[in-house]
Image: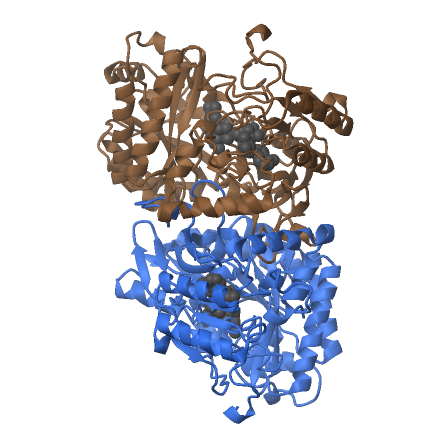
Chain colours: A brown, B blue
């Protein structure tokens, strides 16, 4: 958008006068250097994934000005992060930390409170502080992406020795993804469970190191996560209780071999049986990674072609059109596809693959797809890369489904049970039909639970389209909660609603979170509203949405 | 001790007059019923493991009256726990929750502050609320022991379907052990990592459920640990921030076979090479369980014979005496023994065991012990049971080493590296020699770290013996910390000292813990001093020891 279209430049956070705010920013420039504080008075450009903005949500479902930063600041060290925090307390300015700001589908780089000062940690704090090839660990700063970590292993000749784990898109930050409790697809896919040790700047400016990091001269910060006394790392994930400036991460030893496999199943109704087959195999680690069970509609979208290539009518593309398109692909017609990987030497893989094959074939019409029949740009190969920790961005392709394509995720958690999968699938289908939206369900199967990830793709320049997507999401969240399903993570716009579904005992957990928030952040400066947690200064003033 | 020897009956906690305290206890009796509040005015009996006291540390290293309860209360429900907490706030009485109080080596059932009212949760809250054979999970109350959980699986015919994980002694509480971050020896040995979902009564009386437990009607509380928003479980482990009244635990699917193995190594100096061999095998999960690398002295003690059978002189038993005794055993002479288990079907185990054998035999003199040569009461078979989740108490035997045997543990964490093992072994040997104490080191090898567990066995009726043990421990903690090693867990008497070693950045972590403590427990009633965390009412008043 050209600059003149923006109404107020810059946006001034509530509770401070424009002049005082500009003076405060000038003060911040003196602390961090002129070039490290940018007032957000420029046009809001969405760019694309690799050149994403840090001022707003490039895939916003509201107006872009809704979740917009007033300024962006680039600290270069933990000490400078402390200075920013003290500055924010002094001037009562809300700040919002991002590592890289590629949290697409969940709000991108945008702050929850309009006019917050975004603390872009990644720009200058992007060092890999340690890679330990003996312990299979590393220590990183917020600006280290999955790509960068992977490249560093290569540079040191260690990529055959140990693997990283990457989410579907490799451009995110190891810290940013992990503190939002993101997932990847090797056996180290539960990033939170795989981290070891944090350095955190508290909202009042002190800096702590958790776990063994609190012991001077230790050599175990990345080897043993717990340390002594309360294990506090968890409260710094999906919260607004601190700014993580360093994090340890464990790395996976090369398993001595790997082999991707793919099965397809012919009917929508096969889902329940498939999920029940998966459960014991997954819990027993015969299925070893966070596999994806994907519906054919998203598979067609992952070809990267726009929806209009297949169908130009209103409402969801009819399933027979989708199925006909699938029949034309190298994979062939199907309703569901399972993408997995077996790890280890050949004879060990053979053992597991034989068990899997026997079980999967109990479903009539199950087909194992021979990878040798799949061309190099098939989606399968991107899953193959990701499941062995090689960063990728193929997954972005289905965002092209709509013109000016953007997306937002609905991600409820359920047990790995057929009955639950069927219920969630029916719920999603019904509500997508109601709002005329194409339905992209993919079940990501963790160890004892699965995240259903439903991506709603919308045209970010079409207000009606955005409104329908949001209404659909709000219904999904509420109806799922009524049936006992809650989201594992969510977009800024849904945070209050999702947090509200975790309401047991009259909202006891949120009251507890608020107690912690007020103790740790008495001035309420750090990411107010994130994950539904509002500091005292904001509560009861209509900030929820 | 006969009752007349006790000086004051009952002990009255500081800050409240004797009469007011007795009145308060009467009030508590009205709330919970007469039989559920016991004034501790009886003789302090130590009993033995299976009939342990809940009034004091049956293995105390100080005078028994030092860590002694004024009364014991038995709530029967979460609501009654809430009542106890509100009562404690009203009267400013310190309370100390235990699940079963078998925390031997770390303080047993004793409270940190003399005269605290012990909240013995396990006596009446001992139900297994759920066993889910599909998800491989359970939900338990504090009084459920590893034995009880195992028996419940048997009763339901599920013991072939899934396994529990048990520490060396099976009489402890699943909750008590897990919140103290204890470990067992199957691949599910990291109990904290294997739990899913807590119900917690806060120090101000509110009750929360963590993770998915906060979502009404959920069916994922035990399947997905994190939920939405801050993951707060960790702050309820090794702390005094809440009372856990329910906990979910994951269970291990039967791996389809298992096989214990044992290797011995001839020289003390083989340790470093052995540990370096173990590291990559362990991190790659070729070595799959928390194995023990045990020194021969403790092996001899585990025979259950008193030290006097082998040696009656002062100071540590000479190593040649120990080695001669070992030569007489079915295992034969050795310095170190490795106890491990391979899991899975026979051909999968064979693959792993062959790799292990090749690596272990790189150490000159390494011997694989054929289990068929070992009699039924060999220590090996107790490790075998424990490594497949069958509760046991054989491990108690080495406590007989001293008359009136008691013990206390020193448990530093290090990376799995030979150099660290050598350093810790030398440190331990030197300080044990200095104080004339037999040295029992066992390395418990986790995934990327090991806990060295050094058990000091002492005569609880011998003041000089106790004093030497304590002095040795204090030196061990300080000298280890100076070299960068910190304890993963500790005894009541050492909590302040150990917490003090986690001092990075001027004790920033403890200040943070104190901030949380004051926010959650403004009256400082819950387990003051536990893990070194003192509430505001106690700080700066000389409570530390
Ligand atoms: C097509 C597509 C596929 C995707 N697939 C996956 C997937 O497979 N798995 C997955 O997990 N995600 C996935 N995502 C979502 C997202 O892209 C990734 O999770 C990404 O890694 C998050 O962005 P980031 O790493 O730059 O984090 P950031 O945007 O930097 O951080 C995310 C949030 O965490 C908080 N935060 C970040 N850093 C800090 C810090 N240092 N201290 C305190 N708080 C902080 C902030 O609130 C921030 O908004 C996908 C997105 C798209 C578009
Ligand atoms: C020979 C021997 C071998 C041992 N081997 C092992 C071993 O292999 N692994 C191991 O982990 N331990 C071991 N131990 C130590 C100990 O016996 C076990 O850890 C035991 O399980 C702890 O006792 P408990 O379960 O009864 O816990 P409790 O004594 O009930 O609890 C321990 C502490 O945790 C806190 N706590 C307990 N319940 C709650 C609650 N509900 N809410 C809040 N706080 C609570 C309290 O402060 C309490 O003092 C061993 C001990 C001996 C003597």
Q: Is residue B346 left or right of residue A120?
A: left
Q: Is residue B265 left or right of residue A543?
A: right
The relative height of residue B179 versus residue A39 in the rendered view (above or below) is: below
User: Is residue A216 in view?
Assistant: no
Report the number of discs. Answer: 0
Judge by depth and name the residue closer to the eye, B434 or B487.
B487
Quarter placement of the C terminus of chain B: bottom right
Q: Position of residue A139 (x, y in %)?
A: 65, 41
Q: Position of residue A381 (x, y in %)?
A: 45, 25
Judge by depth and name the residue closer to the eye, A371 or B518.
B518
Q: Is residue B429 left or right of residue A324?
A: right
Residue depicted at 41% across the width and 72% down the height: B28
For residue B365, which quarter of the picture?
Answer: bottom right
The relative height of residue B240 versus residue B474 in the rendered view (above or below) is: above
Residue depicted at 68% across the width and 44% down the height: A207
Q: Position of residue A501 (x, y in %)?
A: 37, 39
Q: Position of residue A500 (x, y in %)?
A: 39, 38
The relative height of residue B110 versus residue A536 in the rendered view (above or below) is: below
Judge by depth and name the residue closer to the eye, B267 or B239.
B239
User: Is residue A170 in view?
Assistant: yes
């Amino acid at each position: 958008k050209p600059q003149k279209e923006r109404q107020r430049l810059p946006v001034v956070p509530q509770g401070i006068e424009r002049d005082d705010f500009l003076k405060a920013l000038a003060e911040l420039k003196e602390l961090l250097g002129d070039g490290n504080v940018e007032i957000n008075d420029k046009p809001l450009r969405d760019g694309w994934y690799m050149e994403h903005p840090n001022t707003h949500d490039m895939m916003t479902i509201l107006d872009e000005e809704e979740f917009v930063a007033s300024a962006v600041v680039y600290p270069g060290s933990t000490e400078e992060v402390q200075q920013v925090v003290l500055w924010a307390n002094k001037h009562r300015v809300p700040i919002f930390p991002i590592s890289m700001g590629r949290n697409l589908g969940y709000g991108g780089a945008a702050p929850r409170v309009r006019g917050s000062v975004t603390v872009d940690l990644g720009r200058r704090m992007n060092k890999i502080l340690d890679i330990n090839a003996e312990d299979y660990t590393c220590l990183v700063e917020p600006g280290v992406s999955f790509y960068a970590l992977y490249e560093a292993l290569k540079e040191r000749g260690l990529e055959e020795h140990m693997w990283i784990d990457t989410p579907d898109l490799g451009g995110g930050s190891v810290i940013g993804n992990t503190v939002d409790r993101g997932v990847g697809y090797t056996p180290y896919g539960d990033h939170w469970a795989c981290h070891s040790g944090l350095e955190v700047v508290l909202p009042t400016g002190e800096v702590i190191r958790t776990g063994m990091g609190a012991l001077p001269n230790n050599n175990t910060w990345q080897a043993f996560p717990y340390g002594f006394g309360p294990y506090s790392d968890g409260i710094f994930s999906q919260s607004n209780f601190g700014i993580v400036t360093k994090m340890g991460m464990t790395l996976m030893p090369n398993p001595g071999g790997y082999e991707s496999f793919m099965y397809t199943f012919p009917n929508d109704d096969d889902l329940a049986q498939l999920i029940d087959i998966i459960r014991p195999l997954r819990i027993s680690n015969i299925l070893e990674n966070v596999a994806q069970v994907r519906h054919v509609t998203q598979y067609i979208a992952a070809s990267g072609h726009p929806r209009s290539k297949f169908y130009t009518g209103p409402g969801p593309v009819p399933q027979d059109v989708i199925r006909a398109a699938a029949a034309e692909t190298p994979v062939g017609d199907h309703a569901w596809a399972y993408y997995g990987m077996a790890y280890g030497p050949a004879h060990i893989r053979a053992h597991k693959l034989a068990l899997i094959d026997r079980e999967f074939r109990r479903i009539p019409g199950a087909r194992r797809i021979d990878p040798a029949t799949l061309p190099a740009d098939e989606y399968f190969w991107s899953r193959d890369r990701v499941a062995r920790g090689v960063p990728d961005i193929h997954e972005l392709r289905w965002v092209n489904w709509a013109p000016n394509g953007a997306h937002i995720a609905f991600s409820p958690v359920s047990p790995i049970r057929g009955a639950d999968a069927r219920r969630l699938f029916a719920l999603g289908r019904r509500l997508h039909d109601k709002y005329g939206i194409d339905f992209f369900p993919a079940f990501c199967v963790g160890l004892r639970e699965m995240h259903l990830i439903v991506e709603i793709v919308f045209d970010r320049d079409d207000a009606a389209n955005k409104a329908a997507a949001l209404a659909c999401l709000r219904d999904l969240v509420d109806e799922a909660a009524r049936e006992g399903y809650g989201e594992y993570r969510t977009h800024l716009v849904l945070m209050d609603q999702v947090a509200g579904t975790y309401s047991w005992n009259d909202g006891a957990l949120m009251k507890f979170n608020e107690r912690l928030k007020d103790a740790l952040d008495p001035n309420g400066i750090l990411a107010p509203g994130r994950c539904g947690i509002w500091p005292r200064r904001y509560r009861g003033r209509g900030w929820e949405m």
